[in-house]
Amino acid sequence: MSAIFGETLSFTQAEGEEVRLVVFGDEHYARYETLDGYTTVYDASAGAYCYADLKDGRFQSTGVRIDSYDAPGGVPRHLRESGPVMAEAHRRRRPGTLSAEAAEDSALTFGPTGGLLEGRRLSVGSVRGLTILVDFPDQATTVTPAQVDALLNAPGYRENGNACSVNEYYKTMSSDLLDFTNDVVGPFRMSHDITFYADPANFDVLVPEALRAAVDSGVDLTRYDSLGQNVVDALIVLYAGKTQYIKDSVLWPHNSVVELEFGDMRTHFYLVTSMGEGPEQLTIGTFCHESGHLLCRFPDLYDYGRRDGDDFTSSGLGLYCLMSAGNHLDGGKTPAPVSAYLRDLAGWCPEKTELNLAGVYQAEHGDYRKVFRYSTGTDEEYFLVENRSKLGFDLHSPAGGLAVYHCDTRGSNELQDGTPLHHYQIALLQADGHLDLENNLNSGDSRDLYGRVDGTALSHSTVPASLLWSGAESGLTLSAISDPGQTIRFRAGPVGVNGAAFSSVSRPALRIPDSDPHGVADTITIEAEGTVRTLKILIDLDHNHPEDLRIVLHSPTGRRIVLAHREATLDTSKLLQYATEPPSAVTPLVGQPAGGGWTLLVSDLAPSHATAGVLSAWRLDIVTGT
C-alpha cells in the first residue's frame, strides 16, 4: 500500500475544474483537507468537493462547494472521524475478483510470517514481471513504452533525475540476489473513461480488463512463472494520467490479490500505479514500494491509525525506509533504502556481525550485504545498527549518521505505545530522545540519528535507552561514535574503567547575590578516566526564598543540566540530592566523560530581599563504566 502524508494534490470536479487538496491516508482510508485546513468530502449529488461536517462520528457533506464559498460558520478545521468509523472502513472487503486475503489484517502492518507478510515470496532469484500500460478515452499520455521500459529495467538509468531504474534499485538493495525485470506491453485503450475506474464501486474492473487486453494481444503468461507453479509472478498495471488518490479506488497506488485464470495460468498478487501525463512524471519510488509488498512480502512500516482500538496515527519508521514514507523522498526519484531489518528478513544480508562481542566496529555506508545485530536471547527481539549517512540513497534523508533499530518480529508499526504488548515491529531509537515518530510530530528530523559521540551514546540509562520492550536491561551499549560519513566507527560493549568510584567535596561558602542571573559558580575537578555510569550530587545551601533559585550543573564537555528553576517545592532546609537513576534531570549525563571540571552555578532570579542566600558546600560522587 502506498500512503500519503500531507501532500498537496490536484483533484477534478465533475465539470472538469481542478481543486487542490491536502491528502492523508492510503487506498483503504483517506482524509482530504483544503489548503486552509477544512476537511472536505466528494459530494456526488453536487459533483464537487464540499466542506465536511461530522454526524455520529462520520463525515457528511455540508453541500457547500469548497471552490465557490467560504466554510460554513461553526465548522471547525481538521475534522476527523471516530476510531470505530475509521476501523470499519479499513475492514471493508473489496468485491468481485479480489481474494479475502487482500483485506485481512495480515496484509497490513503486522508481519505474521517471521516479520513478513504471508503469501508467495520472490525476494531471491530472477523474476520477470508483466507490466501492462493502459489509457482511457478521456485520458491519454505522452509516456512511451520505451520510456517505461527504461524506468523499470535500464542500467545506468538517470532520466528525469531518478537515482536509478527499479531493476537497479532492487539489485543494489539485495546485493544482486534479486534480479527483477519487467516486460512492458501496451498501451491498451480501456472501454470506459478514467472516472469510471476511479469510482470505488468499479474497483474490480480495471485489472481483469487490462490483463484480458494483454492476453488477447498475444502475451504468453507462462513467461512470467519463475517457480513453475502456473502462477504469474508479478502482474503490474500502469495507467495513463496523474495518480488518483481516491480512497477505495483501484487507481490509488496499491498491491493486492486478484484471482483470474487464463488456461493453465492464474494470477495472484498484482500492483496498480500511474505512469503520469508525461515522462517528466515517471519516478521509481512508489513502484519500488509496491514491488516490496508484491515480491518480498514486506509489511508497511507506517501506522494506519485504525486497528485494535488504536485511532492515533503515528509515523512508524518515517522517511527512513522504502516501506514507510521513504518512497516519497526526492519526489520519489531517490527513495530511501530498504531498512536493514527488512533486508535481513528477505535473506539479503549474508554477512552478520554480532555486537554482543565487545569491540570497535566499522559500518560502511551502502554495504547492504552486511548487518550489525545485537541479540537479546529471544529470536524475535533484537537491535540492529547501520550507517545511514547522507550519501547515495540516503542523500535526501532528514538526518545522517548511525541508525539504531529496536526490532521485534511480533510487533507492528501500527502500535506506537512502546509497551510490552503494543510496540513497533521496528522502532528507530531517535538520538534526541524526543519520540517524534511515535507521537506523529514529523516523519523524521535532523536529530534522529547518532552523529559524533565521544562518550556513551546508548546504554540502559541513556535517553533513549537500550531497554527491552519489557523494560528490562538488554545489555546493549554503544559509545565512541565517529562523525557521519562513508565509514562510521563505533564501540559496542563496556566503556572505560568499569566500577571505579570518585568522590569530591567543595565548601565554597559563597554568598548568592539577589536578582543576579550570573549568580555564583564553583568547580569540582574529577581526575578520572572513562565515562559516567552513575552520578550523585548533594548540595548544601541556605536561602530564605528557594523558589527564586536557578541551579545548573555544567559537565566537563560543557553539557548543561538544569537541576532547578524557580521551583516552589524546593526545600533548602535539607541537603538537595540529584542522581542519574531515571527519571531525573541528570540522567543524560550517563555516558559523558567523567574526568575534568564539573561546575555548579546557583543564581537568584527574583527582586532583592532583605537577606541573601549562601552556597555552603556541595559534593559530587561518580562511578565510571557502564
Image: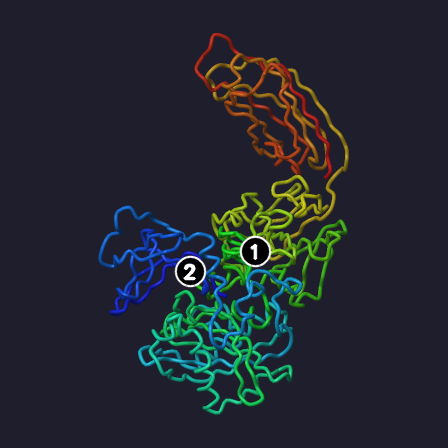
Q: Position of residue 344 (x, y in %)?
A: 66, 63
Name the residue tied to disc 2: 30
**Amino acid beneath label 1:** Asn
> Mark 1 falls on what kind of element?
loop
Q: Position of residue 591 (x, y in %)?
A: 66, 39
Mark 2 residue crowding within 10 angstroms, few (<14) / some (14–19) / many (20+): some
The mark closer to the camera, 2 or 1, is: 2
Name the residue tied to disc 1: 413
In which image quadrant can residue 224 be found? bottom right
Image color mode: rainbow
**Amino acid beneath label 2:** Ala
Quadrant of the drawing holding the C terminus: top right
Q: Nearest the camera: 2 or 118?
A: 118
Separation of residues labelled 2 and 1 (CA atoms):
18 Å
Q: Nearest the camera: 574 or 387?
A: 574
Q: Earlier in the sequence, mark 2 or mark 1?
A: 2
